[in-house]
Image (cartoon, rainbow, N blue to C red):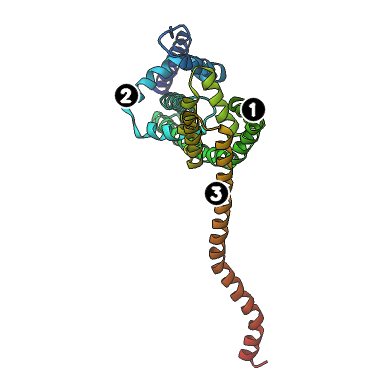
């Protein structure tokens, strides 16, 4: 049974947790009533989409914005890493500073829960504090690793599917379709794929007032891939110079297929070099198996 000092401390911690929770909930509810007249139509649409898709964002919106403003002014190393990895890792349009603030709130809640559990389990305030801090630090580190891993995986999937998507767009535009219709078809055919989500974001941005150039440049920032950068540059320059986009897309598709074949040839050549040493080991093992009976016979005089 807990001693009276521990009961007092646990009661204080519980009161702080409840007060913090109420403050967060009230701040989130109050954030919906704040005027957004000064925001652009794209930013209003982004926030509305976040409220509909993320219950956490909808409840803690005001607190997230307060913490995000502080992170944006500081520009920490963690924020810079999220700026690089988050657009490729997340399907929702999180801002890096908002996502970092959300991580901090979740890690704080995890620390309170783990600390309270440790307090009742070990009846030791020091153990509760230590376990709470470890939970907060571990949660943040796990989220950072998860974001980086997910960004690398989705970027690889995007790169693998991009040549086929551009080929499909080229075929449709050669048949008379417009660039927007071709892009919608690619999104429809790849709804559950990172490529479909990213091109769908391009369509959304153009619907909310961004130009095609701005939407494509934003896509290039979200997915830092050399092939995509060449594709975006070719489309933008083609529109500026009046070159038919169907010819540009056909050239980009052919060029990407050529790069894939060259990459496959390079990997095959490297594999031949890498297989030499394991092949030698296998050959030596086979020779030892064949020769060892004769060696043993000569050693033992049989």
Furthest residue toward front: 242
Furthest residue toward bottom: 301
Percent x, y for residue 181? 62, 25
| The label number, if any, that marks residue 59 in the structure image | none
Choose the circle earlier in sequence order: 3 or 2.
2
User: Within 10 Å of the Cα at label 3, are there few (<14), some (14-19), or many (20+) other Cα atoms?
Assistant: some
- Which mark lies nearer to you, 3 or 2? 3
Residue under the point 54% across and 25% down: 201
Give 53 or 293, whichever is nearer the viewer. 53
Furthest residue toward left: 74
User: Is 291 located above or below residue 270 in the figure?
Assistant: below
Give 85 or 287, whichever is nearer the viewer. 85
The quarter of the displayed image where residue 66 is located: top left
Percent x, y for residue 280? 57, 72
Residue under the point 55% across and 21% down: 204
User: Is 23 located above or below residue 142 in the figure?
Assistant: above
- Which mark lies nearer to you, 2 or 1? 1
- 125 with respect to 239 (left or right): left
Which residue has dot 3 on it? 259
Q: CA distance from mark 3 to mark 2?
A: 42 Å
Asked if residue 196 shows in the view, the reply is yes
Give 224 or 31, whichever is nearer the viewer. 224
Q: Are marks 1 and 3 in contact (CB under 8 Å)?
A: no
Q: Secondary structure at mark 3?
A: helix
- 166 with respect to 12 (left or right): right
- Which mark lies nearer to you, 1 or 3? 1
Which residue has dot 2 on it? 73
Q: CA distance from mark 2 to mark 1?
A: 46 Å
Percent x, y for residue 287? 62, 79
Which residue has dot 1 on it? 177
Q: CA distance from mark 1 to mark 3?
A: 27 Å
- 196 with respect to 115 (left or right): right
């Amino acid at each position: 049974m807990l001693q009276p000092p521990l009961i007092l401390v646990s009661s204080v911690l519980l009161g702080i947790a409840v007060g913090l929770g109420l403050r967060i909930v009230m701040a989130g509810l109050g954030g919906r009533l704040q005027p957004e007249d000064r925001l652009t139509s794209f930013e209003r649409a982004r926030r509305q989409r976040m409220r509909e898709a993320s219950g956490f964002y909808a409840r803690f919106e005001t607190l997230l914005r307060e913490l995000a403003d502080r992170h944006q002014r500081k520009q920490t190393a963690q924020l810079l890493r999220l700026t690089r990895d988050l657009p490729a890792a997340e399907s929702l349009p999180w801002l890096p500073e908002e996502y970092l603030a959300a991580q901090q709130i979740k890690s704080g809640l995890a620390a309170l829960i783990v600390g309270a559990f440790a307090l009742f389990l070990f009846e030791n305030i020091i153990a509760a504090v230590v376990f709470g801090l470890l939970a907060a630090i571990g949660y943040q580190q796990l989220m950072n690793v998860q974001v980086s891993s997910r960004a690398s995986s989705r970027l690889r999937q995007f790169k693998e599917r991009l040549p086929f998507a551009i080929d499909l767009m080229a075929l449709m535009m050669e048949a008379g379709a417009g660039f927007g219709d071709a892009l919608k078809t690619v999104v429809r055919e790849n709804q559950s794929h990172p490529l479909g989500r990213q091109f769908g974001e391009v369509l959304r941005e153009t619907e909310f007032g961004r130009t095609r150039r701005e939407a494509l440049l934003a896509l290039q920032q979200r997915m830092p891939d050399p092939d995509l950068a060449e594709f975006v540059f070719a489309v933008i320059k083609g529109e500026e110079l009046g070159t038919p986009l169907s010819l540009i897309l056909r050239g980009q598709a052919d060029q990407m297929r050529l790069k894939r074949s060259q990459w496959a040839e390079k990997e095959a050549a490297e594999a031949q070099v890498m297989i030499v040493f394991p092949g030698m080991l296998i050959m030596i093992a086979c020779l030892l198996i064949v020769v060892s009976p004769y060696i043993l016979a000569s050693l033992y005089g049989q």
